[in-house]
């Protein structure tokens, strides 16, 4: 579990930094959710927003569990290294996208458009949202909206080769997106202005690129994790030949 903690923190940070991207995907829906409720019913607005976002995060965790099972299947095969490299490259692409330096990541979203065509009609029927159960169900469906950011994080989570860990990482990622989307729904202008600042976006993008570089297989990981002592342990074995 100690090894999982830094990964969970990374996933949480990815969600927080990627919140600006989530605004583009879910921001309009956040506004629609809150506009349906009169301003004086602030408590009900908050309940609907929390239920919607809870449903969305649980759908990320479910996707993490499913793709984590696939990751587990290849974890001990020759494809494991390839999966990790792909995950790292996607993270680097995500960082470039968040920093505003390259938008090629959006092409990844085409992967899920076929599935979304089947889900969208069900999601549309739940609008306008007037109750907590409807908001929860809408969030659970909306979590499958094609999103390059989510797909990249999913592949990164799957590269851990453990279905439970993949689900937990996606849960942490989803929770990281909460502050931005809740703030949007409640019209928290200060937070929104901060996240739109170029400096903040670049800092976030560079952080995610560093996550990607760290994920790439190579000697840098042993150095970072302090495994250099392995060479010392091998010395006694050579002394038996004397």
Image (cartoon, grey):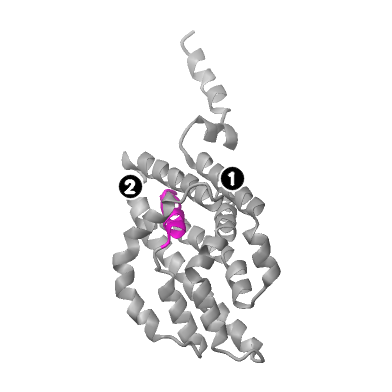
Q: Judge whether 79 appears above or below 195 on screen.
A: above
Is label 2 in a helix, a strand or a loop? helix
Number of callouts: 2
Tell me if mark 1 has few (under 14), some (14-19) or many (20+) residues whose alpha carbon lies within 10 angstroms of its own.
some
Q: Position of residue 78 (x, y in %)?
A: 31, 39
Residue marked by disc 1? 206
Image quadrant in which you'd find residue 40: bottom right
- Residue found at x 35% / y 81%: 122
- Residue at (70% x, 68% y) in the render: 190
Answer with left or right where residue 123 lies relative to residue 238. Answer: left
For image coordinates 47% across by 57% down, the residue present is: 149
- Of all residues, the one furthest to the right in this rendering is 190
Q: Which mark is residue 74?
A: 2
Of residues 73 and 229, which is closer to you in this image? Answer: 73
Residue at coordinates 46% horizontally, 88% vertically from top-left?
A: 128
Q: Distance between the Cα atoms at labels 1 and 2?
A: 30 Å
Magenta part of the chain: 147-162
Q: Position of residue 72 (x, y in %)?
A: 37, 51
Mark 1 vs mark 2, foreground winner is: 1
* Mark 1, secondary structure of its residue: helix
Q: Tell me, yes or no, whether the highlighted magenta stretch contains residue 221.
A: no
160 part of magenta stretch: yes
Residue 110 horizontal side relative to residue 228, left or right = left
Query: Taking the image as drawn, is residue 162 in sight?
Result: no
Picture quarter containing residue 120?
bottom left
């Amino acid at each position: 579990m100690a090894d999982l903690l830094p990964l969970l923190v990374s996933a949480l940070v990815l969600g927080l930094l990627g919140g600006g991207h989530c605004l583009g995907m879910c921001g309009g829906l956040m506004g629609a959710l809150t506009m349906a409720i009169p301003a004086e019913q602030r408590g009900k607005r908050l309940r609907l927003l929390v239920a919607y976002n809870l449903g969305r995060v649980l759908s990320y965790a479910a996707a993490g569990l499913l793709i984590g099972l696939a990751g587990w299947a290849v974890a001990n095969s020759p494809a494991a290294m390839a999966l990790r490299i792909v995950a790292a490259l996607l993270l680097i692409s995500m960082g470039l996208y968040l920093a505003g330096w390259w938008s090629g990541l959006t092409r990844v979203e085409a992967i899920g458009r076929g599935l979304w065509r089947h889900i969208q009609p069900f999601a549309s029927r739940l609008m306008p949202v007037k109750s907590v159960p409807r908001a929860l169900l809408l969030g659970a469906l909306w979590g499958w909206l094609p999103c390059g950011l989510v797909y990249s994080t999913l592949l990164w989570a799957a590269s851990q080769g453990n279905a439970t860990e993949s689900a937990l990482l996606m849960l942490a990622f989803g929770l990281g997106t909460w502050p931005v989307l809740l703030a949007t729904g409640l019209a928290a202008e200060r937070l929104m202005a901060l996240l739109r600042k170029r400096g903040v976006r670049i800092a976030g993008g560079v952080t995610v690129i560093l996550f990607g570089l760290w994920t790439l297989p190579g000697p840098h990981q042993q150095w970072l994790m302090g495994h250099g002592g392995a060479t010392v342990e091998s010395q006694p074995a050579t002394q038996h030949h004397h």
